[in-house]
Image (cartoon, grey):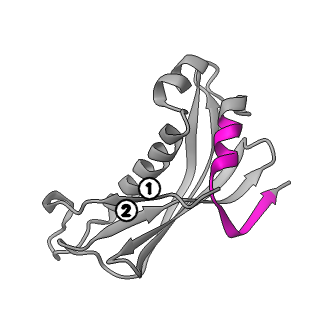
């Protein structure tokens, strides 16, 4: 469970009239980071389509700490904060950092897996469990029982 961090680029279109990052971009970066992590371990959209399952979100929350402006160097990480032992429900947390050491936002996402044919929540197949075993765990990680 090594650290997973990706760089993200602040684009002109990401900036609001106050010349800092639009709030919705933080959520887009969270989704990008989670998908990049799944792809790294082979759990691609094509694979999920074949097996007829996918992630679903119940809650997405961002706590904004320091504004991000055009020209800042930004990274986002991902850590598993909570999970059921079968990985059917989970909480992932992201730290969005600017210029190396400044926490700009903490993004927390509660989710689960859905059977895309039955449109019902499901336990994930073994491939997803393997991927979640590779996810870095937060220092305060906890099992949901």
Left or right? Give the position of 67 relative to 107: left
Residue 42 image offset from top left, x and y in percent: 54, 33
Q: Position of residue 55 (x, y in %)?
A: 57, 38
Q: Which mark is residue 26?
A: 2
**Compared with residue 111, is residue 114 higher up or lower down, i.e. above or below?**
above
At 26% from the left and 65% from the top, the residue drawn is: 22
Q: Residue at x 64, y 41 (%)?
A: 131
Identify whether 31 is placed above or below 72.
above
Residue 105 occupies quadrant:
bottom left
| Residues under numbered marks 1 and 2 in contact, where contact means CB atoms less than 8 Å apart | yes
* Residue range highlighted in magenta: 128-143
Q: Element at badge 1?
A: helix
Q: Is residue 88 magenta?
A: no
Tag shown at residue 68: none
Quadrant showing the N terminus: bottom right
Kindly indicate the quadrant of the structure image that contains residue 101. Answer: bottom left
SS at badge 2: helix
Residue 46 visible in the shown view? yes
Front residue of 30/2: it is 2
Name the residue rendered at 42%, 63% in the picture. 76
Q: What percent of the width, then of the height, locates residue 74?
A: 32, 68
x and y, in percent, of residue 17 in the image: 14, 71
């Amino acid at each position: 469970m090594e650290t997973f961090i990706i760089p993200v680029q602040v684009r002109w279109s990401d900036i609001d009239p106050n010349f800092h990052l639009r709030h919705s971009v933080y959520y887009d970066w969270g989704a990008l980071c989670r998908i990049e992590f799944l792809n790294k371990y082979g759990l691609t959209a094509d694979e999920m389509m074949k097996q007829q399952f996918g992630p679903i979100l119940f809650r997405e929350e961002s706590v904004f700490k320091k504004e991000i402006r055009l020209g800042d160097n930004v990274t986002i990480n991902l850590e598993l904060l909570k999970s059921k032992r079968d990985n059917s429900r989970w909480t992932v947390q992201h730290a969005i950092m600017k210029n190396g050491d400044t926490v700009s936002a903490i993004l927390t996402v509660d989710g689960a897996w859905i059977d895309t044919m039955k449109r019902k929540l499901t336990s994930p197949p073994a491939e997803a469990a393997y991927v979640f075993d590779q996810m870095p765990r937060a220092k305060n990680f906890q099992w949901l029982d």
